[in-house]
Amino acid sequence: MSTLKLFQNDVYLKSVTVVLTEINKNKKGIDLVLDKTIFFPVGGGQSCDIGTIDKYHVIDVFEDGEGLIHHIISEHDCMLDTNTEIEIEIDWNLRFENMQRHCGEHILSGIFHKEYGGVNRGFHMGNDYMTIDISLEGNSNFTEINWDMCLNAEIIANEIVWQNEPVNVFRFANYEEAKDFPVRKPLEFDEDISIVCVGSPENPSDSVACCGTHPDTAGQVGFIKIYKVEPNKGMYRIYFDVGKKALLDYDKNYDVLTQLTNHFSAGTSDVMEKIKIREEKNKTAKDRVYKLAKHISSLEESNIRKTLSNNPTAYKFDILTIEELLVVGRNLSESLTSVLFLVHNPTNTILLFSNGKPDCGKLVNDNANIYGGKGGGHKESARAIFPKEEYIDVFIDLIEKHLR
């Protein structure tokens, strides 16, 4: 005998008394089966309801092939008895959130279908946003979905919400009964068919087969906000959200915008222009710094080249970066007859260069760890990084004595 789905007749029913018919254990945990339930099982792209059965917390709900709905509780033990009456209650906040989001998805999908011939071929209700995958196959005039089209669809969808159109669920025992009802997608079931209709059946804003939960008026959706659109596997993926979650996301993003306008002493209308001006100034400054660093590197390379000898030599730097010192060392490598040490003071890093004799990598591997240093390299160049500045001079002194 299947579980009676009370949510099909009243999605606003938050608690009820039921009879516990089975207590099972499976790989998911303790599984409770009831004679009837208000818990919506996972399905149709919508997550399941959560809540409580007596004092136990329901964390997963699913329907099996026999029509039984299984309620998984988080507790490892269950002291309930079968064939007894118990109170069950859903988490209403989650239920209503799912109702808002699922109905909003219907409305938006219906608009893409009406306006552009787009067919919803995929739907995902995630924690941070929802997505629909729209295939442009119903209207040859459209070959892509761009941002302007999304904004147009968003406005029309929200107008349906603002008009507070009715949302009704029509149930049919089989395909023959349902085949003449107007729907945007062909029916895929032969029996127990539920069609969610937004607006009047004669001229619906959307009408499609669906087993999920929805509010009874479109106004309860709140509002619909599209975030972005991108091509995806020959279709177009629309990122959006609905209702309270969309509002919270808007609040978060507007807080960021407010911080930006305050930071740049601008309004929302000219903040991007001020950011662009700042970026141009930063680019000019970066170009100048790059040219100066390149000039300094060239001067340092020239000075080192003049003082090279057959003995190990060390030079210390505060301004040039490690990357810039690497260029200097590589440019000098062919002129070296001994090891060259270039020290980057800010990071306690020593760069070693030679013409291959001595082997820089071996010098680091054999000696750096004596002073807590780490590093490595190959014959012509290597690096060693030390935990303290004072270890730099003693490491260099050790290498110099080793090479005498």
Image (spheres, grey):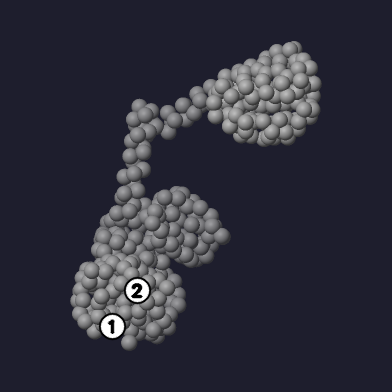
Pointer 1 local density, CA inside 10 Å: few below 14, some 14–19, many at least 20: some
Report which quarter residue 398 is drawn in: top right
Q: Pick the quarter of the image with the C terminus.
A: top right
Does residue 44 sit above or below 190 in this rendering? above
Say whether residue 212 is visible: no
Residues 70 and 117: in front is 70
Report the residue at 37% width, 66% height from top.
47
321 displayed left or right of 40: right
201 displayed left or right of 230: left
Q: Earlier in the sequence, mark 1 or mark 2?
A: 1
Residue farthest to the bottom, as pictured: 1
Report which quarter residue 311 is drawn in: top right
Report the residue at 60% width, 29% height from top.
371
- Circle 2 is placed at which residue position? 30
Q: Pick the quarter of the image with the N terminus.
A: bottom left
296 displayed left or right of 100: right
Does residue 298 sit above or below 65 in this rendering? above
Q: Which amino acid does the dot numbered 1 rest on?
A: Thr
Residue 21's label in the rendered image is 1
Report the residue at 52% width, 65% height from top.
137
Number of numbered markers: 2
Q: Which amino acid does the dot numbered 2 rest on?
A: Ile
29 displayed left or right of 335: left
- Locate residue 129, reporting x and y percent: 40, 55
- Locate residue 134, reporting x and y percent: 48, 61
Pointer 2 local density, CA inside 10 Å: few below 14, some 14–19, many at least 20: some
Q: Separation of disc 1 and disc 2 at Cα?
A: 13 Å
Q: Tell which tag, 1 or 2, sits nearer the viewer.
A: 2
Report the residue at 36% width, 37% height from top.
257
- Locate residue 168, reporting x and y percent: 28, 71
Q: Secondary structure at mark 2?
A: strand
